[in-house]
Image (spheres, grey):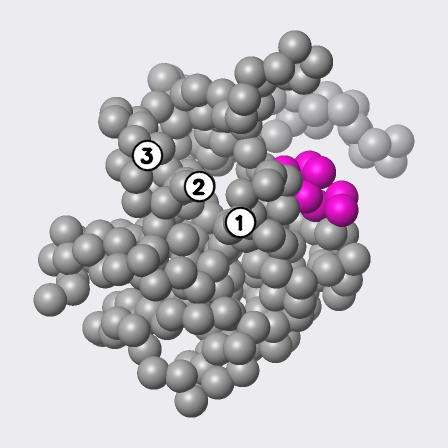
Amino acid sequence: MSQPYYADDAVTLYVGDCRDILPSLTERPDSCVTDPPYGETAAEWDRWPDGWVDAVAAVLPPSASLWCFGSARMFLEHAADFTGWRFAQEALWVKRNGSGPGSRDRLVKLHEWAYHWYRGKWSDLHHEWERERTTANRGSVRKASRSAEHQRDGRATTWVDDGMRQPRSVTYVVETPSVRYRKRHQDEKPLAVVEPLVRECTPPGGLVLDPMAGSGTTLEAAVACGRRAVGIEKDERSAEMIVMRLAQMGLAV
């Protein structure tokens, strides 16, 4: 059985390959939010770990959510890895600056996707989006709607506008300083992008898994929204950075 590299009441962190460590987990996660290597560059760390989806699936409950960051190219190339999962929805986050080298034959990439996969019954899953405030509260709203042939004409619907709305699928993130210049990880995701996904699929007090923890953003997001987290990181130096990050939150000692 693998021994944790770090553990407290909210976060447990392991160092090693998730495909080796996941079978020995004693506590079962409720969900998974992760950012795997896309396998699109020549960088040594950017290698798609074959079999990671199956390894994660083996420790999740029969009805579970998997939020996975990636590019359209990544999901197209590895679609077979998600066999047994259903696609639910996607979120798009727009970066402050483009990524990748300048090129005259390609667009500058300003976005990344997060795809929501699930298995089991949708109604059995936890869903919790933090609603956003709008500019106006119109009180009770009465709006005419088209009627089906068997219904009377002029049917109207009424609802209460409480000044809140469901969040949109596109997130614009402007962080100062940019996470890129914090040098915690080569592909760190902003907390503002990850936290809503953790909240959406993990019940309060529940356990979210990140099998490729990277900079530890999923772990911090879990703590920030009242969840627990278990992370696995292959690179020990990155794990050290995660523990330092947890210390800044007042967790690690």
| Three-letter amino acid code at the position of disc 3 | Val
Residue linked to disc 2? 187
Q: Is residue 38 visible?
A: yes
Instruction: Determine the residue positioned at 73% across, 21% down.
Output: 154
Between circles 1 and 3, the one closer to the viewer is 1
Q: Position of residue 227 (x, y in %)?
A: 33, 62
Q: Position of residue 101 (x, y in %)?
A: 54, 22
Q: Position of residue 243 (x, y in %)?
A: 23, 60
Residue 73 painted magenta: yes
Q: Earlier in the sequence, mark 2 or mark 1?
A: 1
Q: Which residues are magenta?
A: 67-77
Residue 132 drawn above or below residue 232: above
Q: Secondary structure at mark 2?
A: loop
- Horizontal side of residue 66 vs 144, given as left or right: left
- Horizontal side of residue 152 vs 220, given as left or right: right
Circle 1: is it few (<14), some (14-19), or many (20+) Cα within 10 Å? Answer: few
Residue linked to disc 3? 179
Residue 90 drawn above or below residue 158: below
Between circles 2 and 1, the one closer to the viewer is 1
Q: Is residue 141 visible?
A: no
| Three-letter amino acid code at the position of disc 2 | Asp
| Three-letter amino acid code at the position of disc 1 | Glu
Query: Split into 4 quadrants, where in the image is the C terminus?
Result: bottom left
- Horizontal side of residue 196 vs 249, given as left or right: right
